Image (spheres, rainbow, N blue to C red):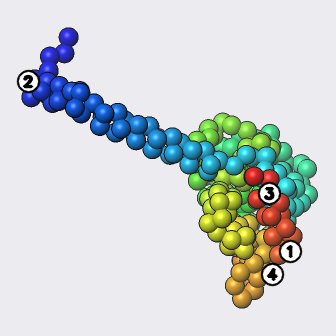
Amino acid sequence: MIKLRKPLKRLLRRILSKKNRSLLVICLSGVVLIGIALYSSAMSQRIDPAAYTTLLTTIAEGESHGNYNAYFGNSANTTLKLTEMSIAEVQAWQDKYVADGNASNAVGRYQIISPTLKGLIKELQLKPSQVFSERIQDKMAIALMERRGAVDFVNDKISAEQFAANLSQEWAALPAVLGDRPTESFYAGDGLNAARVSVDVVLQELAKFKQLTK
């Protein structure tokens, strides 16, 4: 049995006295209401992964023609089965691909480069032994969209144009939308990248995405 010191006992008696009991109830009620509000706010930040489907397709079409086994320089690849390799094996392949003199090691449906893949592994708490499957690739792309402001866009904290501009910094095949060259890739001029999706298509897809989250 825990023994309480006299000052603590007096404090507890004072708090639980009839005079202070109503105040205690009010305080506890307030704590409960705040907890409910915080929980509701957190729930409102979640977006059903299914809502991303058409937007993922648009991004993938520009990046890899929708091929989960694509890699930089070979969007039509059918020989190298990235979707059957572990994440660790994909990372090793990326390192070797660049070491062999290639300009980029972007892989998969969303053309994820090695530094981005490394960050996603940590963020999503993935194991290197997990397969670089279609599902995992989609999950990674959704995480990247959320990094770029998907939740803020859905909650009207940023405009469609701003969200599109953010996405263009993640995926070079998308147009910059904002700035001096809105129809071009954010990375135009680097000799590697070009926009393959129009501004109108991107904005249309963002409108559909937002509608699907309601």
Q: Earlier in the sequence, mark 4 or mark 1?
A: 4
From the image, state whether disc 2 or disc 1 is nearer to you.
2
Classify 10 Å Cα crowding around label 3: few (below 14), some (14-19), many (20 and above): few
Q: Earlier in the sequence, mark 4 or mark 3?
A: 4
Question: Vertical placement of 10 versus 161: above or below?
Answer: above
From the image, state whether disc 3 or disc 1 is nearer to you.
3
Label 4 and label 3: CA atoms lie apart by: 24 Å
Q: Given the current orientation, which residue lies at the most extreme front position?
A: 19
Give the number of the disc on residue 200: 1
Q: What element does badge 1 sit on? A: helix
Q: Earlier in the sequence, mark 3 or mark 2?
A: 2
Give the number of the disc on residue 183: 4
Tag 4–tag 1 contact (CB < 8 Å): no
How many numbered marks have been drawn onto this rendered protein structure? Answer: 4
Tag 3–tag 1 contact (CB < 8 Å): no
From the image, state whether disc 3 or disc 2 is nearer to you.
2
Question: Which residue is found at the position 69% from the left and 49% from the top?
Answer: 47
Give the number of the disc on residue 42: none
Classify 10 Å Cα crowding around label 4: few (below 14), some (14-19), many (20 and above): some
In the rendered image, which residue does mark 3 sit on? 211
Label 4 and label 2: CA atoms lie apart by: 75 Å
Q: Earlier in the sequence, mark 3 or mark 1?
A: 1
The amino acid sitting under disc 4 is Thr
The amino acid sitting under disc 1 is Asp
From the image, state whether disc 4 or disc 2 is nearer to you.
2
The amino acid sitting under disc 2 is Lys
Q: What element does badge 4 sit on? A: loop
Q: Given the current orientation, which residue lies at the most extreme left position?
A: 6
